[in-house]
Image (cartoon, rainbow, N blue to C red):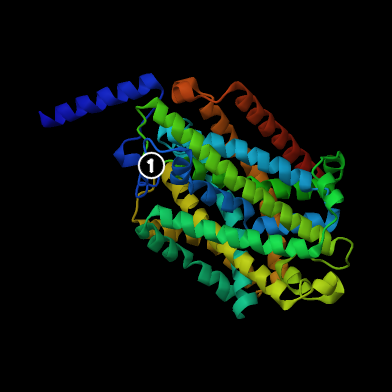
């Protein structure tokens, strides 16, 4: 009798939620269940207190937009084409803001993440295909993060690269400890690491004295970006490094860490508003960091001889007066390595969380948290370690994987974008919180353009166009 009453209440709740366009997953299928709804938010506080309460998830998302993969593509873009690709960083950042706002909206309104909804609303075969593509994208992301962290450990402490890569495997244990301390602690630590990256590169750019008029002109797009194959290849690498597929899954999940009554449309609307503000603020910081990286590459390395597209080369160049002139200093090199380690560590934290979200959402894998996170980390570390062993720890050869990995992320991006745009445009799923018409069509246009550019790039790479 008691069970029947419980079922009736559940059915009534489901009906109410369906009528309002707001859906609940149930306690047994929450995304990141251990932290879902764990952060309280004030009910009747002023704007700033409410914003502070919602601030945090944006930093975890934004850190993925300034990971070591961005360093290689952005600095290489500056060293090869000076300021011309700043326009690509600007457009990529605007796209990121649009998509992350949509991902957060999806998670807050439905109570499910993008992986869960994709698995539920596609056939079994398509769901498996999308899971494989997404797992490969996670691996491509981790290639940059793990190699970046490994090289930073070598530059700072002299560890062999293979040892540094193995040390990054322990990141999963750090994350488990942080999860026990509370999700706000994770947000604060990641935000601190982001601040380190920002101030290091702001300082280095200021002393490099870039050409400001040329720099500002670089934010205006040119047709050469599309007509020049190598420039297009690097541009797509920047897009892939800036707008990463796993961040859409992450954003749709961690937006649910705040306590929200989904039966109260006003509360849902407030959660969407402040989560979006937080996301846009943090992604603006990521835009500034990526711009600084490209500007640094242009100001210090444009026109210089030699390949400066690798971390070790950049580290050495910052201390070499023959390359960067009178500003050369071991301190600059050391700061570069510290920022690289901060970037790699913060990105691996969010990458591991994304791996859990994707694995639980697509294949509904249920296992102890420590085993699940260790598995997701090992899946990502194994290919990087294999390459490191094959190349005998040769950084130059291993880092050649980075730009290729970022281009793959750009190719994988539409497979996350299409379900996201489709779901947030679905009135039956989103109710009164369906994406506005201009948002929907802008997202579709961006998706189509990106698919066309990727096809064009692949055909040119295969010499078929």
Residue 376 in the image: above or below residue 49: below
234 vs 175, nearest the viewer = 175
How far from the left and from the top, in percent, is residue 75? 75, 58
Q: Is residue 86 visible?
A: yes
Element type at mark 1: loop
From the viewer's perspective, tell me whether residue 378 is left or right of residue 335: left
Badge 1 is on which residue?
A: 41
271 vs 243, nearest the viewer = 271
Residue at point 86%, 50% (across, down): 214
From the viewer's perspective, tell me whether residue 78 is left or right of residue 28: right
Residue 219 in the image: above or below residue 351: above
How far from the left and from the top, in percent, is residue 236? 73, 46
Q: Quadrant of residue 450?
A: top right
How far from the left and from the top, in percent, is residue 77? 79, 54
Q: Is residue 120 visible?
A: no
How far from the left and from the top, in percent, is residue 262? 37, 30
From the viewer's perspective, tell me whether residue 269 is left or right of residue 181: right
Residue at point 70%, 45% (across, down): 239
Q: Quadrant of residue 179?
A: bottom left
Residue found at the very far top of the displayed protein: 19
Label 1: few (<14), some (14–19) or many (≥20) C-alpha neighbours in 10 Å: some
Quadrant that contains the N terminus: top left
Quadrant that contains the C terminus: top right
């Amino acid at each position: 009798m008691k069970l029947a009453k419980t079922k009736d209440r559940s059915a009534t709740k489901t009906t109410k939620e369906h009528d309002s366009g707001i859906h609940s997953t149930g306690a047994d299928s929450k995304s990141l269940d251990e932290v879902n709804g764990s952060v309280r938010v004030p009910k009747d506080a002023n704007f700033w207190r409410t914003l502070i309460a919602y601030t945090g998830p944006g930093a975890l998302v934004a850190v993925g937009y300034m990971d070591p993969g961005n360093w290689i593509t952005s600095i290489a873009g500056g060293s090869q084409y000076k300021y011309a690709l700043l326009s690509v960083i600007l457009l990529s950042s605007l796209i990121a803001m649009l998509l992350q706002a949509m991902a957060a909206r999806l998670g807050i309104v439905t109570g499910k993440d993008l992986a869960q909804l994709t698995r539920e609303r596609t056939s079994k075969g398509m769901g498996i295909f999308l899971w494989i593509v997404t797992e490969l994208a996670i691996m491509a992301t981790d290639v940059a993060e793990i190699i970046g962290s490994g090289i930073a450990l070598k530059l700072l402490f002299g560890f062999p690269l293979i040892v540094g890569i193995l040390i990054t495997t322990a990141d999963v244990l750090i994350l488990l400890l942080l999860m026990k301390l509370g999700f706000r602690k994770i947000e604060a630590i990641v935000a601190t690491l982001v601040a380190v990256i920002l101030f290091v590169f702001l300082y280095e750019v200021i002393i490099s004295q870039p050409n400001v008029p040329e720099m500002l002109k670089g934010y205006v797009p040119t047709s050469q970006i599309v007509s020049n194959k190598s420039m297009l290849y690097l541009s797509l690498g920047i897009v892939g490094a800036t707008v990463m597929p796993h961040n859409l899954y992450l954003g749709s999940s961690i937006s649910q860490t705040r306590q929200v009554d989904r039966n109260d449309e006003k509360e849902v609307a407030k959660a969407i508003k402040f989560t979006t503000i937080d996301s846009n603020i943090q992604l603006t910081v990521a835009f500034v960091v990526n711009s600084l990286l490209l500007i640094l590459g242009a100001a210090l390395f444009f026109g210089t001889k030699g390949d400066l597209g690798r971390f070790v080369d950049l580290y050495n160049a910052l201390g070499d007066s023959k390359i960067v002139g009178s500003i050369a200093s071991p301190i600059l090199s050391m700061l570069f390595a510290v920022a690289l380690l901060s970037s790699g560590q913060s990105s691996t934290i969010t990458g591991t969380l994304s791996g859990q979200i994707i694995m639980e959402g697509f294949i509904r894998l249920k296992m102890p948290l420590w085993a699940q996170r260790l598995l997701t980390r090992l899946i990502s570390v194994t290919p990087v370690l294999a390459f490191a062993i094959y190349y005998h720890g040769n950084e130059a050869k291993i880092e050649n994987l980075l730009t290729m990995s970022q281009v793959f992320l750009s190719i994988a991006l539409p497979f996350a974008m299409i379900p996201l745009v489709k779901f947030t445009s679905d009135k039956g799923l989103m109710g009164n919180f369906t994406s506005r018409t201009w948002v929907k069509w802008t997202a579709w246009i961006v998706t189509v353009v990106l698919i066309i550019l990727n096809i064009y790039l692949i055909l040119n790479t295969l010499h078929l166009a």
